[in-house]
């Protein structure tokens, strides 16, 4: 099935409905050959947006992606690439993290170098920074846009109130406003995208580039019988994620995953395909960022597009019944 493209909110830029990101995999779990294969498989399937961040593997994810992009030699005009600022990459000194003008500028220049591009299509504030006024960050982003180093800026995991404040500041000072928010969105994590942000889509024309559509793999069924070695929840340093996903609510979620698998089987698709297609059903989702540590996973997930027409109102009701009690 042909890749559909969606407008990023009210902006004119068109993003592939499925995109591809580097968290945990690039610079950590995978080597250059797999990174090459993943990006090529994505691009060949029509993916035009690659997501990254200064913090992913302390900058190594951007370096790896930059090398692949350079080797691939694709027209720069044919793809979109992002970076995110907040957590830092090379150090944790007071000037090397957060959303101050200082760090936003330094991090942008470092990302451009690592990714080997002249400009970032999307540049996002990876988290809100309570120690920097939103006005300072918005001005820094505006200036980067004015300098041509960034085309569109956005936020990630900001509250509706913080996003509204950013828009108010930009409107008052005539600055380029944020174009997108990057929130977590999947069958177990819905309320911010569906409820808290509901008034924002029309008011500000906000787009969303959503992350962890498979809840880090929980929605593939791979954790139903424990933690397979080599899987994300087995990666050293990600114990916090394991606790988050398989902690007190883990058992109930795995029960739901098993029931969802039965629905997927009935439809003749795989569980990841069902879970990703479900995200795409939400018209306020501009793009679903996929993650994969193997090419076979990515190829399977890209075929979620084929599951989309199978999600009838009746199927959506079944999914709702199974997941309602477990969704945050
Ligand atoms: P998912 O929830 O889809 O998890 C992806 C992981 O699940 C893969 O790396 C793989 O892990 C496993 N997996 C995927 N497909 C399959 C399959 N078919 N069968 C078995 N296992 C599978 O997405 P991510 O959490 O990776 O998020 C996607 C992107 O979103 C990131 O790469 C990043 O760019 C962005 N992101 C942004 C955040 C933010 O704060 N703004 C936070 C997190 C992500 P494994 O094989 O290792 O088990």
Image: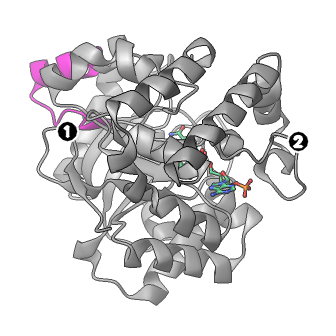
**Percent x, y for residue 201?**
21, 25
* Nearer to me, 181 or 168: 181
Query: Is 3 in the magenta?
Result: no
In this view, the residue farthest toward the front is 266
- At x 46% / y 62%, what residue is drawn? 302
User: Which image quadrant: the C terminus?
Assistant: top right
Label 1 sits on a secondary structure element that is loop
* Residue underneath mark 2: 225
Query: Is 168 in the magenta?
Result: yes
**Percent x, y for residue 179?**
23, 38
User: Which image quadrant: the N terminus?
Assistant: bottom left
Q: Is residue 107 visible?
A: no
In-image side of 315 versus 167 (left or right):
right
**Percent x, y for residue 239?**
85, 36
Compared with residue 194, is residue 266 higher up or lower down, i.e. above or below?
A: below
Q: Nearer the viewer, mark 2 or mark 1?
A: 2
* Nearer to me, 302 or 229: 302
In-image side of 187 versus 258 (left or right):
left
Task: Report if the CB atoms under discs 2 and 1 are less than 8 Å apart.
Answer: no
Question: What stretch of residues is rendered in magenta?
Answer: 164-180
- At x 42% / y 38%, what residue is drawn? 279
* Nearer to me, 286 or 68: 286
- At x 46% / y 16%, what residue is drawn? 191
Q: Is mark 1 within 8 Å of ligand 1?
A: no
Label 2 sits on a secondary structure element that is loop
* Mark-to-mark CA distance, 2 and 1: 40 Å
The colour style of the image is: one colour
Q: First in sequence: mark 2 or mark 1? A: 1
Compared with residue 240, is residue 120 higher up or lower down, i.e. above or below?
A: below
Residue 9 tag number: 1
- At x 29% / y 43%, what residue is drawn? 286
């Amino acid at each position: 099935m042909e890749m559909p493209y969606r407008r990023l909110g009210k902006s004119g830029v068109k993003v592939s409905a499925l995109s591809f990101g580097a968290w945990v995999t690039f610079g950590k779990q995978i080597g250059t050959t797999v990174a090459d294969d993943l990006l090529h498989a994505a691009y060949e399937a029509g993916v035009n947006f690659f997501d990254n961040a200064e913090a992913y593997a302390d900058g190594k994810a951007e370096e790896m992606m930059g090398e692949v992009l350079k080797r691939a030699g694709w027209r720069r005009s044919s793809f979109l690439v992002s970076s995110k600022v907040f957590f830092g990459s090379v150090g944790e000194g007071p000037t090397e993290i957060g959303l101050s003008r200082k760090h936003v500028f330094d991090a942008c220049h470092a990302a451009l170098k690592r990714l080997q591009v002249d400009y970032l299509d999307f540049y996002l504030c990876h988290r809100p920074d309570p120690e920097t006024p939103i006005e300072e960050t918005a001005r820094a982003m505006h200036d980067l846009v004015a300098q041509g180093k960034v085309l569109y800026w956005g936020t990630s995991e900001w509250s509706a109130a913080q996003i509204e404040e950013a828009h108010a500041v930009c409107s008052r000072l005539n600055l380029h406003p944020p174009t997108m928010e990057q929130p977590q969105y999947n069958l177990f994590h819905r309320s911010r995208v569906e409820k808290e942000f509901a008034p924002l889509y029309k008011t500000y024309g906000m787009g969303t580039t959503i992350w962890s559509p498979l809840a880090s793999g929980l929605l593939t069924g791979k954790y139903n019988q424990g933690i397979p070695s080599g899987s994300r929840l087995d990666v050293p340093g990600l114990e916090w994620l394991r606790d988050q996903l398989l902690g007190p609510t883990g058992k109930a979620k795995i029960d739901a995953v098993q029931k969802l698998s039965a629905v997927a089987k009935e439809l003749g698709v795989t569980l990841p395909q069902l879970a990703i297609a479900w995200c795409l059903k939400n018209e306020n989702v501009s793009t679903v960022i996929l993650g994969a540590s193997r090419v076979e996973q990515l190829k399977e997930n890209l075929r979620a597009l084929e599951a989309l027409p199978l999600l009838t109102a009746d199927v959506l009701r079944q999914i709702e019944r199974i997941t309602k009690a477990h969704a945050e």
